[in-house]
Amino acid sequence: MASAARAGAVAPQTTSRPLRAWQQAALDRYEEQAPKDFLVTATPGAGKTTFALTLASRLLQRREVARVVVVCPTDHLRLQWADAADRLGIVLDPGLTNAVGPVRAGTQGYVTTYAQVAGKPMLHAARATAVKTLVVLDEVHHAGDGLSWGEAIEEAYGFAARRLCLTGTPFRTKADERIPFVRYEEDGFEGDAGEAGAGLVSRADYTYGYKEALADSVVRPVVFAAYTGTSRWRNSAGEVVAASLSEAGTRSVEMAAWRTALDPKGQWVPHVIAAMDDRITHLREEGGMPDAAGLILASDQDDARAYAKIVRRVTGKAPEVILSDDPKASKKIERFATGSARIAVCVRMISEGVDVPRAAVLAWMTSYRTPLFFAQAVGRVVRARASHETATVFLPAVRPLLGLAASLEKERNHVMPPPKAQDPEALDLDPLPPKEREAVGLKQWEALEADARFAHVLHGGTAHTGADSGPVAVAPEDEDFLGIPGLLTAEQTASLLARRDDELRLRIAQRSHLDDDTGELPLVQDHPDEDDAGRSWRDAAELRREINRLVSRVSAKTSTPHAVVHTQLRQSVPGPPSASASVDVLRARRERLRTML
């Protein structure tokens, strides 16, 4: 059988590019130890998927395992893993559901989600123990999103032959909520008062951080551009309060100012979107990235839709809107990753694991502020394709985010120290504790208005406003280097952004006459399905859809119920149900149905 032959032809050296040094080193360490459990912590964009699949390929070839099961956070990542595996000659089924018992013939395994495993852990345990299985737990910290998920993962894979855990950054876990198959050590982290047990951090068997990845040119250097502004809101007592994002004072006032700035009705959001669009244009026209794109992270779906309208009004172009409950979300992510659209607006759908190499600009328009989420989200724009590429993150000038940005930026400057600034003024960038509680009464908060203005660029733990020492002369030919640490001084970078900030106000004002309420926003239209020939798991999915269509036609032609046609089909072409049948069986059934028409 062709599919069976392909399934058996798993070679460890079928990657289109040689392994990176860290991937080879991690593989060498794994093979030295031959462990049952192995945790790899590698910065987002470093290539954890390639490492895991190369290991899987070697174990399959040596017959140390006979099946590979990948568990990931989202449905879209199931497709991404299956495509990556297909490129290495490993056939993983991303469409296997809990309603189907056996793993489809002609595959080496399947890709599932943490939620699916939690739905029927014993089913997945049976699949993982029927043969020797390597279980890959992608972004394993998700097993701690709820005790039920962690318990289900342990129940499903406690007796698997091998387990490989992957994560993009070390994660903390409470002592009574340990994630299965992960080793911990005392962290020394001190949380807010009342945070009992916040003192364990994951201990990796191999670690590859942002600093090392930057030195190897695996990831892009990141520049953080902070935007402040004055927010006005009405509190629960009916009083109108005004505060600056960067000088909010108490945490409750800071949170209210932040939420007000993110309100779509204010001016902070359109101003930052215009700055983001300007940066994308610069990268496309002068920065050597003709396909550069940007991501906007929203807090919820309502904000995402509202931000999409603002993008359309400010830039004149409709963005891609990617929402988790959209059945076409995966197709939209694929189209955005390979297409030419400038901006995608999303909630958490694209914040973790999703591979969009051309995305180089991120606008932080969400209230999420944990270190783990920050690292994962910034990781979406740091995947390097060429040595000259850079990433830019636009964010509110609030202490929690500035602290997280300063931490990542400190790692960058260990590798790429910026030129010394002229008489810089320091800014307190100490991060707030990672967990903050909403102030009492904020549920009755009402946003009134917010403006925006460029605040500063972070360099060396210092905020540079572009006006610290008066105007800084920058030659026109040097403007191409905006955002590349080490080529322009911090003052020059900040001065350029501040100067362009005034130009953006004019652009927004010129487009303010556009009325978004006259009709539906003309978003990017869906494209026809692409030809997926040669991609085995996609072949099977398309064959199943085609069989269902043909069964409907036969049923209508012969006045026979669908169930009877399916039964006759399985009698004519024996084998398991279509959901778990091999590609060859599905093709034979398709041909049989065609003869019945």
Image: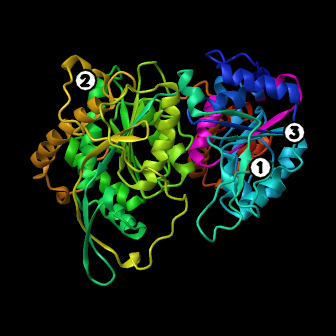
Q: Are marks 2 and 1 in contact (CB under 8 Å)?
A: no
Please state which of the two labelled residues, at mark 3 or mark 2, is closer to the viewer. 2
Q: Is residue 568 left or right of residue 419?
A: right
Which residue corresponds to mark 3?
Answer: 36
CA gap, disc 2 and disc 1: 47 Å
The stretch of residues the image draws in magenta is 56-84
Q: Earlier in the sequence, mark 3 or mark 2?
A: 3
Q: Position of residue 164 (x, y in %)?
A: 77, 39
Q: Amino acid at mark 1?
A: Glu
CA gap, disc 1 and disc 3: 19 Å
Please state which of the two labelled residues, at mark 1 or mark 3, is closer to the viewer. 1
Which residue corresponds to mark 2?
Answer: 479
Q: Amino acid at mark 2?
A: Glu
| Rendered residue at 32%/59% (across/down) | 247
Quarter of the image where the N terminus is located: top right
Circle 1 packing at 10 Å, graded few (<14), some (14-19), many (20+), is few
Which residue corresponds to mark 1?
Answer: 185
| Rendered residue at 58%/40% (across/down) | 546
